[in-house]
Image (cartoon, rainbow, N blue to C red):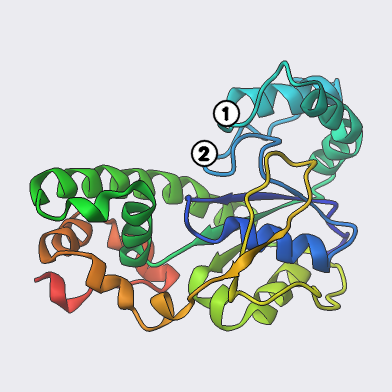
Amino acid sequence: MTSQLQFLKQYGERRTGTNYLRGLVSATFEHLTVLMHVLGDKHSVPCDLDTSGISDPYEWVSSRTWALPAKTSNRNDARQIEYIRSIADPLYAAAVSQRLGFVISIKDPYAWTASICRFSGVRWNKVNDQWTCAFVRDCCGRFNTNYRAWAAMLTRFPERATLVRYETLLEDPDKVLQSIARISGLPCNGSGIPGPNYRMNACFWDFAPSRPCEYEFDGGYYTNRTYLDDLTPAMVKAVTRTIDWDLFAPLGYQPVDRAS
């Protein structure tokens, strides 16, 4: 890096550890602002980053934010408007001067499917495999679309973008922090927040601080691949047949043998 990053735009599907990662990064890098909602929802495809057609910083930031809004984004919320105004000038300058970085969270497609099904209550509908598998295929289709767009950013901005695998976040969070330090040019002094055995509360919007939950998180569910027990053979096969493995193999993910 020739200059230090000021802002880090976050992307990743739901249930990929984005809330914990935001808390970890914010606690570690004091002068790096993580954006979840500003410049579009962290769960959406990237916004148009071209600054050549708009010279007013507030107009550029707000137009990108409202074009791809998160569920909690509200253009009539005075707090959100004020927050955008407070960072518009430095954020616009960072975009122009290439001091805006990107972090993309990802999880093993099978683990993600089990997590999104559990979060949506789908795992209780195992008896209706036809409906469940249709839900799985729809989710995996979105997974492909979003990560195809996000992976392109790794190629477009190799010095300012990094991929965070959920598995690495659980097993070696320091390695994740070092990857952020590498692209940001900022020193890494440790986060001082609880390890990944604790959940992180979701933040209402970017101006809100990250706070750990009071209850523990069972990381072994993922590291031991227990999540496969929550998927029927038909659901596993739906993942295997829907996921674009040509896209995800270079990111370290492979189809499981059980899906045959």
Residue type at mark 1? Leu
Q: Secondary structure at mark 2?
A: loop
Seen as rendered, the residue at the extreme top is 76
Where is residue 196, by image quadrant?
Answer: bottom right
x and y percentages locating residue 110 in the rendered image: 30, 65
x and y percentages locating residue 253 in the rendered image: 36, 71
* Residue under the image location 53 percent in, 71 percent down: 217
Quarter of the figure with the N terminus? bottom right
Q: Is residue 232 visible?
A: yes
Q: CA distance from mark 1 to mark 2?
A: 7 Å
x and y percentages locating residue 88 in the rendered image: 86, 31
Q: Nearer the viewer, residue 102 or 228?
A: 228
As drawn, the label of residue 202 is: none
* Residue under the image location 56 percent in, 56 percent down: 155
Q: Is residue 72 found left or right of 76 in the rendered image? A: left
* Residue under the image location 81 percent in, 65 percent down: 27
As drawn, the label of residue 68 is: 1
Q: Is residue 133 found left or right of 227 in the rendered image? A: left
